[in-house]
Structures are given as C-alpha cells and as structure tokens.
Amino acid sequence: MDKSNRRAANAATLQQELRWLSDVIQTRLDMQLRHERRSPIEDVFEIAPPELDSEDSMYASFVAHYEMGFGERLTALLALAPHVQPQLLDLFFQTNERLNRGYTEWGGVQGKMHGGFLPTGETALFLIAGEDLDSRFEHQRLFDADHFFARHNILKLEPAPSGEPILSGRLVMADEIIDFLTTGEFRKPDYSRDFPAKLISTEMEWDDLVLAPTTLEQIQELEAWIRHERVLMEDWGLARRLRPGYRCLFYGPPGTGKTTTASVIGKRVGRDVYRIALSAVVSKYIGETEKNLERIFGRAENMNCILFFDEADALFGKRTSISDAHDRYANQEVSYLLQRIEDFPGVVILASNYTTNIDEAFMRRFQAVVHFPMPDPAERKRLWTASFSKQSVLDSTLRLDDLAQKYELSGGAIINVVRYASLMALDADTNVIRSADLVGGIRRELQKDGKTL
C-alpha cells in the first residue's frame, strides 16, 4: 500500500474511532452531571468500539497486534486526540458552577501554546471508571512500567511535580507512534534537545571497508543477529533464554573505521544509524545526563534503528571510588546506563579508543567486543589506492608501497592527507598529486599525535 492509501485508510478508521470516543465522553459527562437528557446507558462499557477486523489500516493493525481492550483502546485514542481532533476534548472545559472552576475529577491541563484541553491520567480513568473505585484501581495498571504502553514506549504519563498525584501527569503518546497511526509511516527525527542524536549515512559499500580479517568476521556476526533475530527469538523459541537486542563495543584508535563500519552495517541491513556523541550528552548538572539519555532510548524504542554511541569514554569509563557527592552521582549515571542499555531491545554500538577505559561491568554485557587496530602495511596500501580521485594523477616519483610501509597512519588520517594534497593540486591549477604535498599532509597528521617525520 502506497503512502496516500495508508494515510487515507488511517483517516477513515480514525473517523470511526473518534466518533466512538466522542460518544464515550458525552455519555460519561452526562452520567457525571446527571443531565435530564441522560442516556439510559448505565456504563460506558456498553458503548461498543467500532469493529476493525476488516479495516486495512495501520491503526487497525496496531489495535489488533496488541489485542487492546476497551480501556487500552480508549486511553490510546485519548492520548492521540489532541493531535488529530483537539476540539473533541473541548467538552472538558465546562465550569463547575458550585466552585466556579473546572471539575477536579476530569483532570487535564492546558499547554503553553496549545489552546485546547490536554488529557492526563486522571482524565483517562475518569472516562473509564467514573466514580467506581474498583474499576479505577483495576485500570491504573495501564500506567504500570510492565504494561505494553510503557514497555514499547507507546504512551506514558509525564512525571507529576513532587508531592502531587501521579495521575495528574499529562498523557503523552510517543511522536513516532503518532506518525504511525496518522500518516502510516515513521518520520525520521531531527537532532534536537529532545533527541540529541544525528542520523548518519555513507556512500561506502562492504567491499570498500579495509579492516583486519578478525574484525570483519565479528562484524558479520553482528549482521547475522540483525537479519535473523526474529527467527532466533520467536521461531526457535530462544526468547525465554536470551535478552532482546544486541550490545557491541567497537574499540581502537581514532580513524580506524568505527563510525564508517556502523554506517555500512545500517546500509546493508536497511536500518537507520543514529550517532550520539556522549561528550555532548553528559551534563554537569545532577540528573540531566540520565534525562538526556532517556530521551534517546525512549524515542528509539519504536524506530528499529541502530544507536551508535561515539566517544563512549566520556561516560562509560571505570566507576570511581566515592569521595564526594559528584562521584556518587557519576556512578549513578553509569549504573543507569548499564541497565538502560541492557533493557533496550535494539542494536547498540559503543565506540571507544581504549578498552581499558571501559568498566568491567559493561564489558560483561557486550555480545561482541570488536577491535579496530591500526591498519598493517598491506591494508594501508589498499587505503592509499582507494582514496585518490579518478580525476587526479599521481606524480611519477610517488610510490604508494613506500608510503604504506614507512608511515603508520589510520584510514582517517590517510583520507586527510589525500584531501590536503588534492586541494594543493587544485590550488596550483593541476590534477597532479605531488609527492611534496603528500609528505606535507603526512607531517600534519603526525603532528596531531605529537609525532614528527
């Protein structure tokens, strides 16, 4: 089904669902306010939701997949309503004439820019249970951590201010679920404060990777997991014994291909790769690092993507001995990440320059630890050969074998040298790559590491 048909199918299904939600709201309010025109219905559960079995839409598939009951379906629709038909909730703006304000039991808040009614957990339980405490207590499970709403990051309650009822938190549906239930496709998030991760890609293919044979073998194992995880876990029944997801550490000197390899893997298996620079996520303010990381993990739950944590040394270093409050909170951040990475059902790749900087507790949780060593002379020769433009010509005095043997450079450093020498050639109005320019570029790269020719 193409995009326009998916969108039209979702719209048709949601029209039915929203009419049902409107009927439930009107009936519950009539029952609460005891209007003379009160419906003969004694319980909102008598208002049957639309039959969606034959509906060919993403929304219908969503409801069927989770085998959603009355309360779950109503709560999900209530969370979605402000995004698709906000005026439907305007009924909740009625004033309690006795108190000259809104009705406490209806819950709800008003946004900073949104002029409509934003439902809270209290709103959902009011619609489902009314004044029936037993039903209310039963349906509070909708917001438990082990409910599929939370486990699959579909919707949640925003944390209420300290000391206030938990159910006063706003009912929030994940952005990607809103996209899926409306347009029928997931929108790729942009880098922002709420999602501090950047989508990365590459023009390179598998054959372009110049890696040690043992490194390539381990990369193939990771690919095999991504391709066969569902069969392994479901058809082979190993879900009872194996944790979902795959956790992998890439380690090695800068420029040895860790980021490029992650991008190539994503390209080969058809998954987006999001790069998170941990140095930009870690905050000096207590609790902020956890919040930043939770935004990433929470958003990524439904994206079927690969999370690539670069500069892992910024956070995943060895936990310190506790000598002051900051040490204690730093250790809490590490512990939080240990648990969150282990709970994440997707693929997480961490990149570090040195394994000695990684806490042993993390090392035990990796399915694979992949070493990206400095390339040997033969690999450096391949890198030099593949890096030059086909529009350029090498100086007749250049011997790539000699360069590969003499200078221990990473793939990233070789690319930098080629870029420098190519620019110098263009600046001299020629396409000839000169030996002096290559040596100059090599000198610049070595100086970065405090070395000399």
Image (cartoon, grey):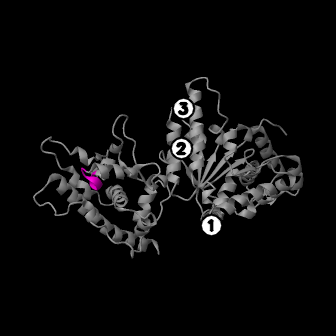
Distance from Cα at disc 1 to Cα at disc 2: 30 Å
Q: Which residues are magenta?
A: 126-131
> Which residue in the rendered view is the most extreme toward the top?
323
Does the CB distance between marks 2 and 3 fall below 8 Å? no
Task: Determine which of the numbered discs, if any, sits on residue 293 in the image.
Answer: 2
Q: Nearer the viewer, residue 179 or 153?
A: 153
- Image location (x, y in percent) of residue 10: 38, 69
Q: Nearer the viewer, residue 72 or 112?
A: 72
The residue singled out by tag 3 in the image is: 284
Identity of the residue drawn at 35% across and 55% down: 79
Tell me the amino acid under the disc marked 2: Leu
Distance from Cα at disc 2 to Cα at disc 3: 14 Å
Per the image, label 2 sits on a secondary structure element best described as helix
Q: Earlier in the sequence, mark 2 or mark 3?
A: 3
The residue singled out by tag 1 in the image is: 231
Disc 2 vs disc 3: which is toward the camera?
2
Disc 1 vs disc 3: which is toward the camera?
1
